[in-house]
Amino acid sequence: MSDDKPHAAGNVDAGDTSERVGMAVLRERGLEPEELREKLIDAIGAEFTTYYYYTNLRMHLAGHEDYKEIAEDARLEDRAHFELVAPRVYELGGHLPNDIRDFADRASCPDAEVPVPYDDEGGRLDITELAAEDVLEVLLEAERCAIRTWSEICDMTHGKDPRTYDMASRILQEEIEHEAWFVELLSMERDGEINPAGHFVRGEPGDAPLSTNRRFNDSA
Ligand code: ZN
Ligand code: FE
């Protein structure tokens, strides 16, 4: 009879809560769940710190209401990316670092700090002299780091871990959109060049059309 139900048992003993089939199946496919999990913690460390840094970067776009709005969408979507993947860390037998300093330190992207403005002779200017183009460049490079990070996770999980792959590919799509937004804004602001992103506005601020947790539970 058991031949009729080949998945009724596997290499985790019945009732054993110290092992997870959800991890064992990854190992069987040649993906080390622990290695993936640690990479995910690094990646969402970057999403979380970016969410923080974008708050400050957005403040320094004062007077550019259109830029502020787009920075806000990218900021809230990065928070959505953190929220989306955090449960996956636990499913893979891990946990978030208890100390937020450890979490920030292991983030897979550089800190997106407000850049220090300099004059033509290299003298340090007051922060109020900061040009919008300098803020936009920091935003752009943060998005590029995120694209590289989630592309790597897509490559690691493709054909092996459909759940993580699905999350990473949703996030990647939004990060690619974010890059296009900041390419458009920086091109015009710094070079007077038209380089369209093809984007108008998100619905609500930080809509996260592909990555928001809410949509997984949407019964509508
Ligand atoms: Zn993100
Ligand atoms: Fe982003």
Image: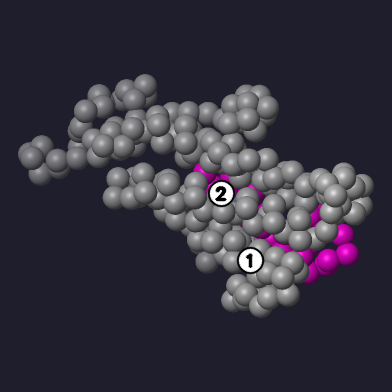
Going by the numbered disc 1, the residue's amino acid type is: Val
Which residue carries the number 1 mark? 183
Q: For label 2, count other residues whose C-alpha is less than 10 Å away and answer few (under 14), some (14-19) or many (20+).
A: some
Dividing the picture into quarters, in which one does residue 25 lie?
A: top left
Q: Is residue 17 magenta?
A: no
Report the number of discs. Answer: 2
What's the residue at 47%, 36% (across, down)?
39
Residue 111 lies, in percent from the top left, at 68, 40
Q: Main secondary structure of the magenta part?
A: helix
Numbered range of the magenta stretch: 58-87
Sequence-wise first label, 1 or 2:
2
Left or right: residue 5 compared with residue 174: left
Dividing the picture into quarters, in which one does residue 24 lie?
A: top left
Give above or below for 14 relative to 186: above
Taking depth in this image into account, of 150 and 7 the one nearest to the observer is 150
Residue 132 lies, in percent from the top left, at 80, 60
Q: Residue furthest front?
A: 121
